[in-house]
Image (cartoon, helix red, strand yellow):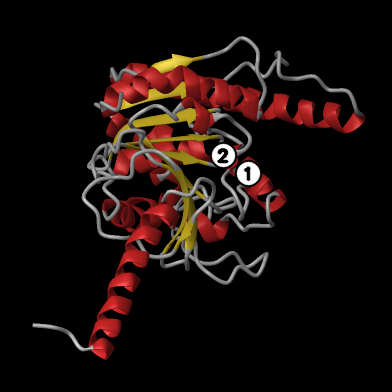
Amino acid sequence: MRLGRPRFQNLKRRLLGLSAAALVLPVTAGIAGTAVAGAAPIAHRAPSGGYEEVMVPSSMGPIKVQIQWAARGGGAALYLLDGLRARDDRNAWSFETNALEQYANDNVTLVMPVGGESSFYSDWMSPSNFNGQDVTYRWETFLTKELPDYLATRGVSRTNNGVLGLSMGGSAALTLAAYHRDQFKFAGSLSGYLNISAPGMREAIRVAMLDAGRFNVDAMWGPPWSKAWLRNDPFVFAPKLEGLSLYISAASGLPGPFDQPRKPIDFYNTSNAMGLEALALVNTRAFQVRMATLGIDATYSFPSNGTHSWPYWSAELFNARTQILDTLNAW
C-alpha cells in the first residue's frame, strides 16, 4: 500500500520527532556537571558514577540532596551529615573535604542532604520560636523514610547503608543507626557529642544553637527533663548499637598540621576549634568506656593532634573508608 504525500509527510515528521527525543535524552542525562532533578525516574539500578543534585519531597518542603552515584551502579549508600552550621545551599562535605574524590571509584553512593542548621537531624516538637522558623524540623523522618523512598526509585538499597557525620552530625549518625537498624549497617561519629547527659552539656548545646541560627533547643527535645533528651543521647542508648559496624573518632584539640593561623581572626577560630574538640574528646572517651562496659566493639581513632575543623574530618573519613566499604560490600 502506498502512502499519499500528506500522510507520508505526517509520518515522517512523527518519526523524526521520536528520533530527536531518543537522541536528546541520553545526551542530556550524560552531561557532566550539576544536574537538578525534581522527580525520579523509575529504575532498578542506580546510575553508574556521576554527580547529581535533586530536590526530594518531604514534610518540610522540598529538600536539596547532593548525590555522587556508585561507580558501578551498586545499591549501597553512605549518608554524610553536616555540622551545627549546616548551610542551605550545599552540604559542606562536598566542598570542605575531598569526600567525592575519595569515593569516586568505589561502588557506594554518597548521599549529602543540604540544610538542617542546628537540627541534630532530629524530629522536633515544634518550630523554633526565637527565629521565626515556619516549619517543624522532621529530619529523622526525612532521612529514614522520605529520602530512602526516593533513593529506592533510583536503585539504592533500603537496607545496605551507612551514615557518618561530624560534631552535631556525629551524634545524629549514631542516633539514626540505633533506631533504624533495618536501614543502616555502619555508623560513624567524628568529633561528636556522645554524652549529652553529662553535666553542663545540655546548657552548652542550648548556647551553641542560639549562636547557630538563634534556634530554641526547647523546640527540639523539650525542657532538660524531657525523655527526648535521653532518647537522643548515645551514652544512654548505647546498648542499641550492638552489632553495628562503628567508627568513632575525636582528636586531642591540640593544633595539628592543618592549623596555621596567621591573622587575629585565625587565632580566634583556632582557639574555638581547640575548645570544641577537647569537649568532643571528653564526650567520646566517656562513650568509649560505656561501650566497653557493655562489651560492644567499635573502631576508635584518637589522633594526638587535631582541632574541630574540616581537614581533620576529611582525613578521618578516609581512615574509615576500608571499614565502610567492607561493611557495605561496596568495593
- In the foreground, 235 or 83: 83
Alpha carbons under labels 2 and 1: distance apart: 31 Å
Residue 124's x, y, as percent?
A: 47, 59
Question: How many marks on residues?
Answer: 2
Left or right of residue 124, residue 130 in this image: right
- Image-quadrant location for residue 325: top left
Give the residue type at disc 1: Glu
Classify the position of the N terminus by image quarter.
Answer: bottom left
Looking at the image, which is closer to me, 21 or 90?
A: 21
Which residue is tagged 2?
94
For numbered disc 2, what is the local secondary structure?
helix
Left or right of residue 319: residue 161: left
- Is residue 289 visible to the viewer in this orientation of the structure? no
Question: Answer yes or no: do the residues labelled 2 and 1 have beta carbons within 8 Å?
Answer: no
Pinpoint residue 136: horizontal percent, then vertical percent. 50, 66
Extreme residue toward the top, this view: 304
Q: Nearer the viewer, residue 35 or 199?
A: 35
Q: Which residue is mark 1?
A: 203
Point 90% across, 28% down: residue: 263
